[in-house]
Image: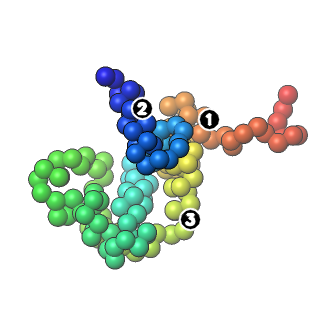
């Protein structure tokens, strides 16, 4: 059985069991992958991900969410830590403290926009290089048809 058939079967069974109707993939839009600049942009993005449970009010401290990577890094057993990839940069010494401070609204908005568009995340200069290198020009354009009078013929 190939992967697509397994996914299709799982989706159909889920909808039958929950008596829900759905189209497309069951987990569509939940997981994202995009190029990220090494350095501060990488740390900012990891901070955004590891703050999810705290931002949602599920825990008081981000490292208290037992299903998070920060929890696994700090308190996980060897088997859990083997699931984590090494970071391309060293974490700041005060990472856990920094993690628990509110993230600036502008950072969150920039990250969400990059995720929504599946566009590279980093400095403007790095993003421009990554777009050209990986052929991601479509992630930089606005969605939909251009407004009348804003495009050249």
Question: Which colour style is shown?
Answer: rainbow
Q: Residue at x 62, y 35 (%)?
A: 138
Number of residues whose C-alpha sits closer than 10 Å to that of mark 3, classed few (under 14), some (14–19) or many (20 or more): few
Point out residue 46 in the picture as x, y percentages from the top left corner: 37, 57
Residue lying furthest left: 78
Q: Residue at x 37, y 71 (%)?
A: 58
Q: Quadrant of residue 135?
A: top right
Point out residue 76 in the picture as x, y percentages from the top left corner: 16, 59
Q: If you read the primary sequence from the N terminus, does the residue marked by circle 3 or circle 2 appear first?
A: 2
Q: In the depicted view, which residue is nearer to us: 25 or 149?
A: 25
Q: Residue at x 21, y 47 (%)?
A: 83
Residue behind mark 3: 106
Q: Which mark is residue 8?
A: 2
Q: Residue at x 72, y 39 (%)?
A: 144
Residue lying furthest right: 149
Q: If you read the primary sequence from the N terminus, does the residue marked by circle 1 or circle 3 appear first?
A: 3
Number of numbered discs visible in the structure rendering: 3
Q: Is residue 98 visible?
A: no
Q: How far is the residue under mark 1 from the one under mark 2?
A: 29 Å
Q: How far is the residue under mark 3 from the one under mark 2?
A: 38 Å
Residue behind mark 1: 138
Q: Is residue 108 left or right of residue 33?
A: right
Q: In the depicted view, which residue is nearer to us: 152 or 48?
A: 48
Q: Is residue 44 left or right of residue 131?
A: left
Callout 1–callout 2 Cβ contact below 8 Å: no
Q: Nearer the viewer, mark 3 or mark 2?
A: 2
Point out residue 91 in the picture as x, y percentages from the top left corner: 29, 60
Q: If you read the primary sequence from the N terminus, does the residue marked by circle 1 or circle 2 appear first?
A: 2
**Element marked by disc 1:** helix
Image position of 42 with respect to 11: above or below? below
Q: Quadrant of residue 146?
A: top right
């Amino acid at each position: 059985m190939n992967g697509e058939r397994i996914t299709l079967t799982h989706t159909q069974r889920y909808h039958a069991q929950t008596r829900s109707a759905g189209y497309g993939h069951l987990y569509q839009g939940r997981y994202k992958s995009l190029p990220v600049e090494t350095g501060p942009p990488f740390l900012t993005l990891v901070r955004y991900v590891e703050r999810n449970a705290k931002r949602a009010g599920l825990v008081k401290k981000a490292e208290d969410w037992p299903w998070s990577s920060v929890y696994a890094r700090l308190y996980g057993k060897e088997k859990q830590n083997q699931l984590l990839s090494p970071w391309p940069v060293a974490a700041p010494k005060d990472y856990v403290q920094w993690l628990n401070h509110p993230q600036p609204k502008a950072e969150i908005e920039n990250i969400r926009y990059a995720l929504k568009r599946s566009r590279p995340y980093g400095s403007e200069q790095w993003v421009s290089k990554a777009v050209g290198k990986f052929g991601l020009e479509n992630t930089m354009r606005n969605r939909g048809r251009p407004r009348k009078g804003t495009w050249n013929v």
